[in-house]
Image (tube, rainbow, N blue to C red):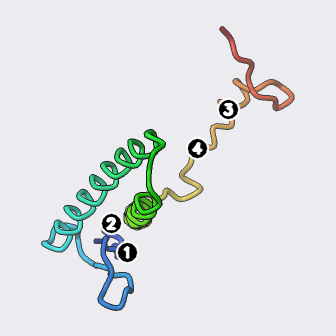
Amino acid sequence: MTSGTGELRLLPWVGPEGKPCYLVGDGAGYLSRLANNMESTQLGLAGELFQEAKRVLDKRQWTQGELQLLAVELTEALGNVHRIAVSRGARLTTPADDDLDTGGDLEDEEDGQDGSPPALSR
């Protein structure tokens, strides 16, 4: 969906030809909820696969077929997680540069006079 600014939401699936799917809306509709549920499922499966990969690799006894299957599944999961990250990142709002506090006064107080980083105290 959009973040209220008319931006598109990259959906967590692709179309029949492998092209990305986008959605425009307020984030409250059926497709938004479906996309949220799919993202949640994909992230959960990626976490489970990560744990399984750690178990397989920790044993240090695997066949070439097991490693190939693991690589294929991890690649798919990483692709899903990447798509979710891109989608969510695109929907983040960023403040205008002039709205940011550069912290110049704070930096001057914490940094050394020569611009060196502050000393660590124990």
| Type of amino acid under label 2 | Ser
Q: Quadrant of the N terminus?
A: bottom left
Residue 25 locus on image (x, y percent) = 24, 75
In this figure, what is the number of numbered marks? 4
Whole-angstrom CA distance, mark 2 to mark 3, is 33 Å
* Earlier sequence position, callout 2 versus callout 4: 2
Badge 3 is on which residue? 105
Q: Which structural element holds mark 2?
A: loop
Measured as percent of width and height from the top left, residue 88 is found at 38, 62
Question: CA gap, disc 1 to disc 2?
Answer: 7 Å
Residue holding disc 1: 7
Mark 4 lies on residue: 101
Quarter placement of the C terminus: top right
Q: Which residue is mark 2?
A: 3
Q: Residue at x 28, y 55 (%)?
A: 45
**Amino acid on which the number 4 mark rests in the picture:** Asp
Which residue is located at x 70 percent, y 24 percent?
A: 110
Q: Is residue 44 above or below residue 15?
A: above
Q: Is residue 96 left or right of residue 62?
A: right
Name which residue type carries label 1.
Answer: Glu
Residue 52: give x, y in percent of width and height.
Answer: 35, 47
